[in-house]
């Protein structure tokens, strides 16, 4: 069973383990050689509302992480959050990413006043693209030579999802 909860400073070792995995970080915007100390500092920083970091636990072990962040505080883009997901290599393809995405979409749709979720994904990351499509994300464009990965510039897709049923006034 997969349990989703908010990340805490005590999860720093798990973040470092997952983000430092040579099978995981090439698919992220992370750099190699991360450490528990780096993640302890990041996790200790308070997040502005409505930003959130979650972890997925299975049998008491953190096997996935995700976060939604506002980025720069631009008034006209308050309705947008950027999303990132990472799953431990040994837990990929086992529903962890789906559980994290479900929790993020629920949080965005029902609690955080989010109309638009955005993300970037490397164009060759077919499993991640399939996961995002499953939750309503669509490819909106390609950023050429977006990021350096293992000595080569790689393209990413810009993907986004609009709230499927935006809130309205209650008819009480």
Image: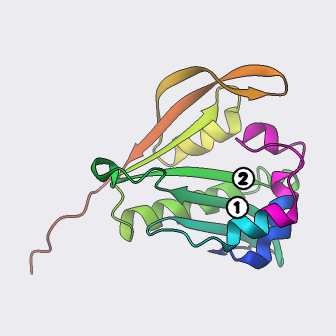
Instruction: Give the residue number, with chain letter if any, for mark 2.
Output: 86
Pinpoint residue 50: horizontal percent, then vertical percent.
Answer: 44, 67
Magenta region: which residues? Answer: 17-38
Tell me whether the residue at label 2 lies in contact with that at label 1, contact meaning CB atoms closer than 8 angstroms: yes
Above or below for 106 versus 156: below
Q: Quadrant of residue 172?
A: bottom left
Q: Does the magenta stretch include residue 107?
A: no
Residue at screen point 63% across, 62% down? 99
Pinpoint residue 97: horizontal percent, then vertical percent.
Answer: 67, 55
Q: Which mark is residue 22?
A: none
Considering depth in this image, is 88 or 93 the residue closer to the camera? 88
- Regarding mark 2 in the picture, which secondary structure is present there? strand
C-alpha gap between disc 2 and disc 1: 5 Å
Binning the other alpha carbons within 10 Å of mark 2 as few (below 14), some (14 to 19) or many (20 upward) gives many
Using residue 46 as the reference point, say whether residue 93 is left or right of it: right
Considering depth in this image, is 26 or 78 the residue closer to the camera? 78
């Amino acid at each position: 069973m997969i349990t989703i909860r908010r990340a805490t400073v005590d999860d720093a070792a798990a973040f470092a383990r997952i983000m430092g995995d040579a099978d995981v970080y090439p698919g992220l915007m992370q750099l190699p050689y991360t450490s528990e100390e780096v993640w302890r500092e990041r996790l200790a920083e308070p997040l502005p509302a409505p930003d959130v970091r979650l972890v997925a636990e299975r049998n008491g072990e953190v096997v996935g992480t995700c976060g939604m962040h506002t980025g720069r505080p631009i008034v006209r883009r308050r309705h947008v959050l950027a999303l990132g997901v990472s799953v431990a290599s040994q837990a990929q393809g086992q529903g962890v990413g789906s559980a994290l995405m479900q929790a993020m979409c629920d949080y965005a749709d029902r609690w955080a006043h989010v109309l638009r979720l955005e993300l970037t994904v490397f164009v060759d990351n077919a499993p991640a693209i399939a996961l995002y499509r499953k939750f309503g994300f669509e490819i909106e464009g390609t950023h050429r030579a977006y990021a350096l990965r293992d000595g080569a510039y790689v393209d990413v897709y810009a993907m986004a999802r609009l709230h499927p049923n935006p809130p309205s006034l209650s008819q009480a």
